[in-house]
Amino acid sequence: MSTFVAFSDSVEKEGLIELTVTEALAVHTVRARLEDNPRTGERRPSYDPQAEDYVVHLDEATTGGRPISVLHRYHPALDGTLIYWLVIGP
């Protein structure tokens, strides 16, 4: 069974529309990987003791454009991950 992964409203309405086709493909590839391994990326401090925050850094070679950081929060009890922020550029 795979983990539920969703984009936050702000990522869907603002972040994804700013991406080129190759950048969007790289972000959607991260989303697909999170379904199989929600603990992907570098662990970050979290204000919620029941959740785990991570960041995945994508370089220019991976995105075919600008570097992108994908920030996501995994909640083990819910087996769900929310991609809540995209940092686009250096």
Image: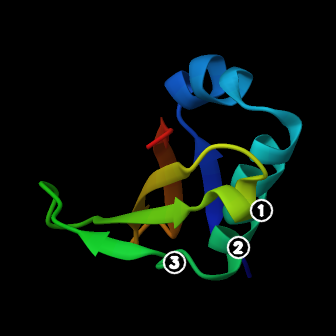
Provide the secondary structure element on which disc 3 rests: loop
Left or right relative to 35: residue 69: left
Type of amino acid at the residue the image marks with label 1 = Thr
- The C terminus - image quarter: top left
Establish if 28 lies above or below 62.
Answer: above
C-beta proximity under 8 Å, tags 1 and 2? yes
Q: CA distance from mark 1 to mark 3?
A: 12 Å
Provide the secondary structure element on which disc 2 rests: helix
Query: Where is residue 69 drawn, in percent x and y?
Result: 48, 52
Provide the secondary structure element on which disc 1 rests: helix
Q: Residues within 10 Å of mark 3 (few under 14, many from 20)?
A: some
Q: Quadrant of residue 74?
A: bottom left
The residue labelled by disc 3 is 40
Q: Residues within 10 Å of mark 2 (few under 14, many from 20)?
A: some
Q: Which mark is residue 29?
A: 1
Type of amino acid at the residue the image marks with label 3 = Thr
| Residue in front for this viewpoint, 20 or 72 | 20
Q: CA distance from mark 1 to mark 2?
A: 6 Å
- The N terminus - image quarter: bottom right
Q: Which mark is residue 33?
A: 2
